[in-house]
Amino acid sequence: MTLATHIAIAGALGAPFVGAVPPVALFAFALGSHYLADTVPHYDYKLRYAFNEGPNPPRFNLLDFLIHDCGRVGFDIALGATLAVAALGLENFLAHPLPLFLLGLGSILPDLLSALHAGFPSRFLQWNQDFQDFMHSKTKLSWSITAALSQLAILGTALSLIHFS
C-alpha cells in the first residue's frame, strides 16, 4: 500500500480523536492502522535497492538511490501529507500540528522501519519485519490498471472520510 494511502487511512480514523486523546495514543493508533490496512490485498510499488528480491540486484549507487528510492518515497509521503492536510483543512492542521504529525508518522513508520531493516538488518528491527510479514496480505496485486484503481479507490475513500471534530 502506498504511504499516501496509509496517511489518509490514519487521518480518516484518527483525526476525530485529536484533542480527545493524548498524541502518543494517536501515534499508537496510527501504527495499528498501518498493520491492519496491510491485511487488504493491495499494490506495492518497487524500490530499486530496498526489498529487491530479483536474482541480480543492482549495485548500490548513492545518487541513484537518492533520486529513485528516496525520491519516490519522499513524493509518496509529501502527496499523502498534502492530501490529508487539504482534507482536514489547513486551519485544523495548524491548530493541532503535533498530534496530526504523529498520526501521519505512526501510519508510515512500519514501512520506514522495514526499509531500514532491509538496508541494515538488526535484531532490534526484526520484530517489525516479522509482524509486517505476518499481517501483510499474502495476495499481492502486481502493477495493472486494476491495482492502480484499487489503490486510488482506497485513497479516495479514506480522504473523503477525513473529518475533524
Image (cartoon, grey):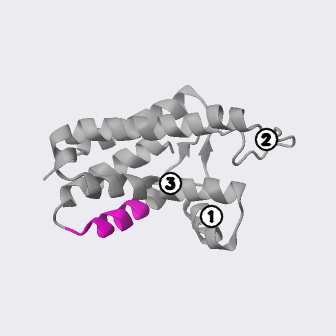
Q: Residue furthest right?
A: 56
Q: Amino acid at mark 1?
A: Gln
Residue pictured at 61% horizontal, 46% vertical: 140
Q: Residue furthest left?
A: 165
**Label for residue 129?**
1
User: In the image, which is nearer the foreground, mark 3 or mark 1?
Assistant: 1
Q: Residue furthest front?
A: 63
- Helix, strand or loop: magenta stretch: helix
Residue pictured at 30% horizontal, 41% vertical: 84
- Label 2 crowd (10 A; few <14 / some 14-19 / many >=20): few
**Residue 74 vs residue 83: left or right?**
right
The residue range painted magenta reads 21-33
**Label for residue 143?**
none
**Label for residue 60?**
2
- Let me know if residue 142 appears in the view: no
The disc, 2 or 1, on the residue closer to the chain's N-terminal end is 2
In the rendered structure, does residue 20 fall within the stretch colored magenta? no
Q: CA distance from mark 3 to mark 1?
A: 13 Å
- Label 1 crowd (10 A; few <14 / some 14-19 / many >=20): some
Residue pictured at 58% horizontal, 66% vertical: 128
To which residue does mark 3 refer?
38
In the rendered structure, does residue 31 fall within the stretch colored magenta? yes
